[in-house]
Amino acid sequence: MAAWYYQIALGGAPSITMAKSSILRAEQPLAPDLPFDPTLSRSSGGAARSSPRRRDLVFIVNPLGANGRTGKEWKKLLPYLRSRLGRDCNVCESLTSGPSHAIDITREAIREGADAVIAVGGDGTLHEVVNGFFWAGKPVSNHDKEAHHSTALGLIPLGTGSDFARTFGWKNDPQEAIERIAKGVRSPIDVGVISSENEESHYFINVADIHLSAKAGYYASRYKRFGNLCYVIGALQAFIGHSNQDIRIKVNDGEWETCTQATALCIGNAKFFGGGMKITPNADPRSGDFEVVILQDFKWYDFILKLHKLYNGTHLSVRNVHTRRVQYIEVEDLSGSGRIFVQSDGEHLGFLPRKFCILPSAIDMIC
């Protein structure tokens, strides 16, 4: 179905052009003061100027993220965006209208040859954008087979949680993020793949986790209006009726192993989850493998007594905490309950069994 899209070239005298474009899917009107300067594309004599190719940047914004704060902060950021990027880049804005919309926008932007797709929001928006880089088990590619560039991934953290940004040591500063985007330095990063029988593959960039922590994330998503407090509320609700369960795992090409009384199993491509908890402290999205951390036989009071260790990443020395490096791990439920939760990047994905593998250097990220 055809749809109208909005495209903005930033910088210069105020005006807006509305075009039918397959890159953008902005369901809401853009801010009326966003300018288009024809001198950026033509000289005063009307002839086209010869200049280096301008980068096409697509910003995907969840205006309802963080209980509406993302949309408000994005509007405040636009003047700086105009002044910093407008001369060298074609800047396109797309506002998401609901779940999975960012996935569709990303795929279309890549097919149309965007130089970068920038997620504006929290880890949930970033998660959808990453999934948009893939379709039917394969990377999405530019329609122009002769194009000499690939589409990079960028991030402006404006959501409830910005756990992925913490791994790179990025401050929660959108202007600093725009400076990174302006410089355009790329670094290849790994992406995790989650698969199961009769279901489409799912991709993650940060942390996937199983059982208690995944259940806490599932409940936390209901309370995002409370900001980072949602993670505390989610954890308290997850503890109600929780019991540790036996699971079994197969790592790489090894044999099946039983993990008794598993409390949580976390598969880290990056280090942080749950609003700043350094759960997989040695994970690196450029290493080519995951760090897997398994918590066994934890009681509710263990989390209270050791919570500071989980946040500062020193919990690996605690009894009943085990870690290893893997490229592939398969996890099954031995309890027969069919109710051991699975999530990735804070998104609920269902229940065990699941397979997790890494795609080394799968995406270029603007770092």
Image (cartoon, helix red, strand yellow):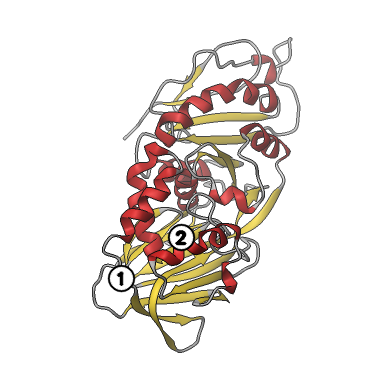
Left or right for 338, reference 87: left
Residue nearest the viewer, comparing 55 with 210: 210
Q: Is residue 149 above or below residue 21?
A: below
Instruction: Choose top left, top right, bottom left or bottom right for residue 343.
Output: bottom left
Q: How many marks?
A: 2
Q: CA distance from mark 1 to mark 2?
A: 17 Å
Mark 1 or mark 2: which comes first in sequence? 1
Residue 201 visible in the current orientation: no
Query: Residue visible at 38% across and 64% down?
Result: 300
Residue farthest left in this picture: 337
Left or right for 268, reference 264: right
Estimate the x, y position of residue 318 in percent, counting from the top left. Answer: 55, 73
Q: Quadrant of the N terminus?
A: top left
Element assignment for label 2: helix
Residue 186 visible in the current orientation: yes
Estimate the x, y position of residue 244 in percent, counting from the top left. Answer: 34, 73
Amino acid type, residue under disc 2 in the picture:
Ile
Question: Within 10 angstroms of label 1, few (less than 14), some, or many (20 or more) residues?
Answer: some
* Mark linked to residue 289: none
Estimate the x, y position of residue 6 in percent, counting from the top left. Answer: 47, 25
For label 2, the residue is 304
For label 1, the residue is 243
Question: Within 10 angstroms of label 2, few (less than 14), some, or many (20 or more) residues?
Answer: few
Amino acid type, residue under disc 1 in the picture:
Ser
Residue farthest bottom in this picture: 255
Query: Residue visible at 43% across and 86% down?
Result: 257
Residue nearest the viewer, comparing 182 with 43: 182
